[in-house]
Image (tube, rainbow, N blue to C red):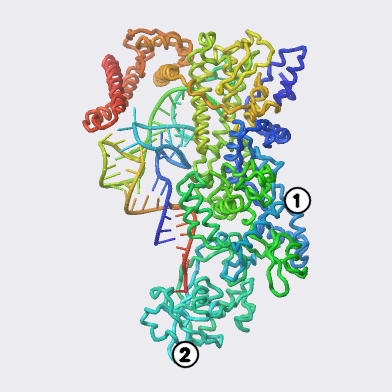
Amino acid sequence: MSEPGAAATGFLSRATRTLSLPLPVLTYCFMELAKAYDPKEAEENHYKRWEGSGFFAPEINQDPNAAPFSIVVPPPNVTGSLHMGHALQHTLMDALTRWKRMQGYRTLFLVGVDHAGISTQLMVIRQLKKEEHKTPQDIGRDAFVEKVWDWKHKYGGEITKQIRKEGVSVDWSRERFTMEENLSRTVREVFVRLYDEGWIYRGTRIVNWCPRDKTVLSDLEVKEEKVKDGKLYYLTYPVNGGGTVTVATTRPETMLGDTAVAVNQSDKRYKDLIGKTIALPLTNREIPIIADEYVDPEFGTGAVKITPAHDANDWEIGERYGLEKLVIMNDDATMNAAAGAEFEGLDRYDARAKLIEKFEELGLLERIEDYDATLPHCERCKTVIEPLLSEQWFVKMDEMRDLALKLMRDEGLPHFFPAVPHTKVYTAWLENLRDWTISRQLWWGHQIPAWYDDAGNTYVARTKEEAVAKAGTDDLRQDEDVLDTWFSSALWPFSTLGWSGDTLVPIDAASASKLPSDLDTFYPTNVLVTGRDILFLWVSRMVMTGMKFIGKKPFDDVVITGTVLDKNGQRMSKTKGNGIDPLDVFERFGVDATRMALAGSATGMDFAWRDEKVESYRNFANKIWNATRFCLMNAGKSRIDAATLRRGDAENEETLSLADRWIVSRLNKTAMAVNRALETYQFHEAVQLLYHFFWDDFCDWYIELVKDEIVGSGDTLVPTDAASGSESLLGGGTTDGDKSVPAPSRILTILEIALRMLHPFMPYLTEDLWLKLPGVSNELHHAAYRGAEATIMLTDFPKGDASAIDGAAEAEMSAVIDMITKVRNIRAEMNISTAIKFTVHIAADAAMQSVFKANEAQILKLAKAESLVIADALDVPKASARAVTNDASIAVPLIGLIDFDVERTRLAGQIAKLTDEKTRLDGQLSNTNFVERAPADKVQELRDRQTELNDQIATLNNNLEALK
RNA sequence: GCCGUCUUAGCUCAGUGGUAGAGCACUCGCUUCACACGCGAUAGGCCACAAGUUCAAAUCUUGUAGACGGCACCA
């Protein structure tokens, strides 16, 4: 058969049906699917349609009372490219969003991109140098910023293209960028308000200075790293009035900025020196010897050089004693004039070498020791940070911190998943928080909305006009610096929803009407999914600003994912080159398989990447494809019809087999468990449940059990052409009175529901197959989406129905499965060819006898047996292979085929296994403490099992005896 | 230094007071009419180590060892 155009998309096929073509058989007889699933075709076909049809936007929901569900994607850097961490987070967020959307929530899955100040600026500087051999200073600020925007427009879409490949259902119509005007306006508004309240201030502090990027960095952008070849230098300073004092330092060049030497007052060695002065070598300066608690007499020499302008601790001491703060370096870590003419212009390391040389010449270098130093490095460029005295803007953290801490202490929010260790880490960090340095010496970013007049007055304002009005002059100069990228990120949950300065709480009628509806509807968001690396940088700050400006937490739950490590358990990094490119994995195994592998690993723990894992989900996708292919091949004229599975219907009661009742029970159990797992973000649990339901229960057992019944049966009856009107089997619902062909309709219906459950994780495959199923339409959609074009992504997500769980069916089925497995085991272990058919003798109680009788055909087929003899007791020749199940004894006469040695070994093995269990049980049950103190039902359970084991062991022993 | 996580089958990982699970790999069989990206049947673990709590501990407590992470300090 060939009709690729029509078969490629199911909705074309639907169209042909409504057109009533002269050959109606075509409308039901779908083209046979390819033998294996090719993800590429589905990936190309569906995403554009989903996006173009508005399925991703909250407006698709027609229910005015629909509850909102919203997630904001952590905005990736505009310079970034997709990595496994993104793929993991996006997969989880998308699974949640699709799940909630299918449940009828009005979902907003909001995406956007971060302007990434330093990274982007460096990228463009590099490009400018390469293409035009110019520096930013050559072309000036405005032209440079223009260049960055050009770069953004040209390359900034890369990351969003990659995100589209993942199949995530984000609402692109609401895509945001941190530097776009309305978000910038929010940034200025927040800055001005915080300044007006005194929560933002400008001050001179020791800051983390990156001499290469030539900007200040916040504490969080600095990484402590061990340096090799660290040295501790012992410098001797002459004391005025005689004697010397030796100080130890790792940065000897900073001695040029020393303004004191400190010792501990309790240190007897230096007691007499306190109050004296030192003639600081190479500088002609006289500096005091002071006493301070800070000095540890045990470390180094017990005397510390104090350089207030180049060390945070020294700065504190300088403040306490009113010491001069002498800055001796430029912003590129070369020495300045204050370091003296001999050193001016030298790089810090050259200055160090020269200084040591000088001290040696003067005989003042006592010694140099090897020393394992851990130094702060620029997280981005790995340059050693220089602590430097500098005037910067800061956010005062006292009140900000308290907002977040109060939310945690009063309400336990946000609720972290997993709670351990993140709740504690988050709280502890807040408790020890220091002020946040927010200015950056860059051109790309939100320029600080502060203006200065010639007199040095500061005017912080939303616009220049406002500043001019405040200042009464337009002769103003705006602060050159921009804000930390994380400042705008901190506002993301409300800036992206259109916050314009109104707070949400308390909502009075007057202000409510002014509120932008997105903010009103979707804030607070429901859950944030992110990595632990930005817990402090981003998560905590969103909480603070959300509480401050909206008066509400930005999200209830925070899912912190584990880290995807390489196959050796190492962190992936660009420098190591051990990263795994998600796009490459998509290419090799398909997006859905990758998503399953990621979601199936998401426990909050780190995990090592395994291609094999994706491969197994690629195989799973193929399994789903082929199961569907099988169902379609045998669908004939049947179609999805929930009525064929409904219990309580007299006609169905007659035709529903054990397998039918069992699979319905399993389906409902699975649906309930999947929902439960997703409620608590147990993604791996949901994935495992779906995998095993589909592969083990549905494919390995259900399809095999009903195969004979459905093959070729679909054509025996023709259903009327009316719309089936079937609702989710699992959600209840109604159906019309049509008589469908039961067996093939049932399997199609089960399949259809299974595809819905799989959809949040495997969107492409499930959509592709769903559209091909006979009888799908927007009638299967959740009520909120009935008007939309048919798609699985708007169907009702199966809730599962506890009353559909059939304990009897599960128990009976388990007996049948056990029976079949034991017979197969005999065949395999006795090495009996499948060509040889044999009779299976079964001894069981009356109830079980009727179960086996009712399923005789299935047992014969799956056990490859010729006939069953079911009785109260076994009556078979000696030359029989034996087995026991919990429900029956089995014997297979194998005259002339049996190898008695093999059979004896088999039986002995079975006996040994059961005896192990019995020994444990006997021990436990003979322990009076256990019998008396354990719950009665537990004891009874073990007693029942003990009886069962005794019987089985006795039976097997008799069998074994008989063979001797 | 402080805080924390992990250590379960060859590998990667679930499990979390009441007889130890999955995927992959391994072994044996199968061209069974949806699928060899498959089907069937096995094998494989005193759940890092030690002590404690409990009728019962892989699961709770404490300690030890190893791996890893966060924070702080480092003159």
Give x and y (percent) for residue A876. Answer: 34, 8
Closer to viewer: mark 2 or mark 1: 2
Residue lying at 54% horizontally and 81% vertically, measured from the top left: A357
- Mark positioned earlier in the residue sequence (2 or 1): 1
Q: Is residue A136 visible?
A: yes
Say which of A157 and A277 sits in front.
Answer: A277
The crowd level at tag 1 (other Cα within 10 Å; few <14, some 14-19, many 20+) is: few
Q: Quadrant of the N terminus of chain A?
A: top right
The residue tagged 2 is A240
For the residue labelled by badge 2, is the local secondary structure a helix, a strand or a loop? loop
Asked whether the residues under marks 2 and 1 belong to the same chain, the reply is yes
Give x and y (percent) for residue A711. Answer: 58, 13
The residue tagged 1 is A154
Residue lying at 50% horizontally and 45% vertically, measured from the top left: A415
Reply above or below: A129 against A169: below
Q: Is residue A767 visible?
A: no
Direction from residue A942 to residue A280 in the image, left or right = right
| Amino acid type, mark 2 | Asn
Give x and y (percent) for residue A296. Answer: 41, 73
Say which of A330 and A169 sits in front.
Answer: A169
The answer for how far apart the CA atoms under marks 2 and 1 are is 66 Å
Say which of A800 and A191 sits in front.
Answer: A191
Q: Quadrant of the C terminus of chain A?
A: top left
Reply above or below: A242 against A471: below
Residue at the farthest front position: A509
The image quadrant of residue B59 is top left
Residue at the farthest bottom position: A241
| Amino acid type, mark 1 | Lys
Label 2 chain ID = A
Label 1 chain ID = A
